[in-house]
Image (cartoon, coloured by chain):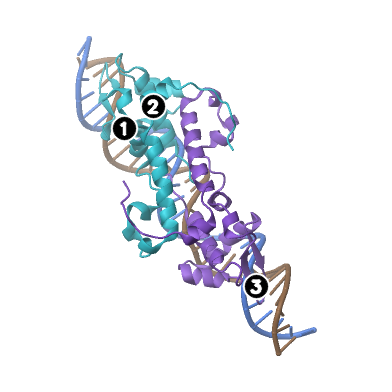
Chain colours: A purple, B cyan, C brown, D blue
Amino acid sequence: MIKVSTKGRYGLRAMLEIAKNHGKRAVLLKDIAKNQGISEKYLSHIIPQLRSHGLIKANRGAKGGYMLTRPPNKITLREIVEALEGPLWLVECVGAPDVCPMSNSCKTRNIWKRLSQVLLKELENISLADLLKAEVKDGENYQ
Amino acid sequence: MIKVSTKGRYGLRAMLEIAKNHGKRAVLLKDIAKNQGISEKYLSHIIPQLRSHGLIKANRGAKGGYMLTRPPNKITLREIVEALEGPLWLVECVGAPDVCPMSNSCKTRNIWKRLSQVLLKELENISLADLLKAEVKDGENYQ
DNA sequence: ATAATTTCTATAATTTTGGTAGAAAAAGTC
DNA sequence: GACTTTTTCTACCAAAATTATAGAAATTAT
């Protein structure tokens, strides 16, 4: 159905929580879970992915928690979403032409490639800082 | 993982096969399956969706087969992909804000909405005719 | 009637998603 | 050094979606 999973959605929201406190304090998993209404157990699978991709730093033990490794304006949404959802090609053959013998003569592959690149570019042009300062007015409807 | 399913991929390829013969002859499911290397049985689930969405016309019985209902330059990829994959919002709350009480104050929702719209617009601007005449040179790599 | 063709209903295997449970590892505090 | 807090890892599991297959019914041309 071409959907972003809870991993991507929850993970992005977690990043936003951590970013909110950038420069102030480390943020606890527990607090992210509470503020965002997400199961603590489930979040504890998602957040380590953000760390292993170098987007956040974790401190264990008392006084622990999470911090950004870089200021929010140096982190793009592409990095975040890719860390959580994997490579953003909409069909496998875009990134790995070998999976299909027809790859180099397939007109539909070109479409999926183009579409993937549009998506990527859009995500690359938005930083976590942009997201933080974004106004939320639910104007026009989706169409 | 944000991927297009076989339904979307096979279905688009089927449309291309039918479009190839637009104005000439009706195309058989059997032939589409053979030309595209797709299971006939499986395709026979996918193609009716294209018909119920008004993109193709089916004739049953001997001398049957499929035809476009409109010339290829009047069919957009948005229509095709939406017929196969369902509405193209990347998260549910974009199209149905009621599914989440936080929708109207959620900064991440705005991102998913923007992204969905970018995707839509791109697909809307490509017609089946464009796809037909597209050159396939596998130039630059995905990055 | 018969042959060709699409379409519908039912079933099923496999994979992905969305979790839960519990223990281990690390670090600060008393 | 024991204790508490906190992240992280391993294992498991249920539900849903994906990717099909089988077979029969419906439709149409000859």
Q: Amino acid at mark 2?
A: Ala
Gap in Å between the C-alphas at discs 2 and 3? Answer: 55 Å
Residue A114 vs D29, above or below: the answer is below
Residue nearer the viewer, C11 or B13: B13
Residue nearer the viewer, A99 or A138: A138
Q: Amino acid at mark 3?
A: Gly
Tell me: A109 left or right of B51: right
Q: Which mark is residue B116?
A: none
Q: Horizontal and vertical percent for residue A118?
A: 48, 39
Residue B72 vs D20, above or below: the answer is above
User: Residue under circle 2?
Assistant: B14
Q: Quadrant of the C terminus of chain B?
A: top right
Name the residue at 62% across, 66% down. A67
The local secondary structure at tag 2 comes to: helix
Q: Horizontal and vertical percent for residue B28?
A: 34, 20
First reached walking from the N terminus: tag 1 or tag 2: 2
User: Residue under circle 1?
Assistant: B50
Q: Horizontal and vertical percent for residue A57?
A: 65, 63
Q: Horizontal and vertical percent for residue A79?
A: 58, 50
Q: Quadrant of residue A55?
A: bottom right
Q: Which mark is residue A64?
A: 3
Q: Alpha-carbon neighbours of circle 1 within 10 Å: few (<14), some, or many (≥20)?
A: many
Q: Amino acid at mark 1?
A: Leu
Kindly identify which chain the residue marked by label 1 belongs to: B
The local secondary structure at tag 1 comes to: helix
Tell me: D22 left or right of A27: left
Q: Alpha-carbon neighbours of circle 3 within 10 Å: few (<14), some, or many (≥20)?
A: some
Q: Alpha-carbon neighbours of circle 2 within 10 Å: few (<14), some, or many (≥20)?
A: many
Q: Quadrant of residue D4?
A: bottom right
Closest to the camera, between mark 2 and mark 3, is 3
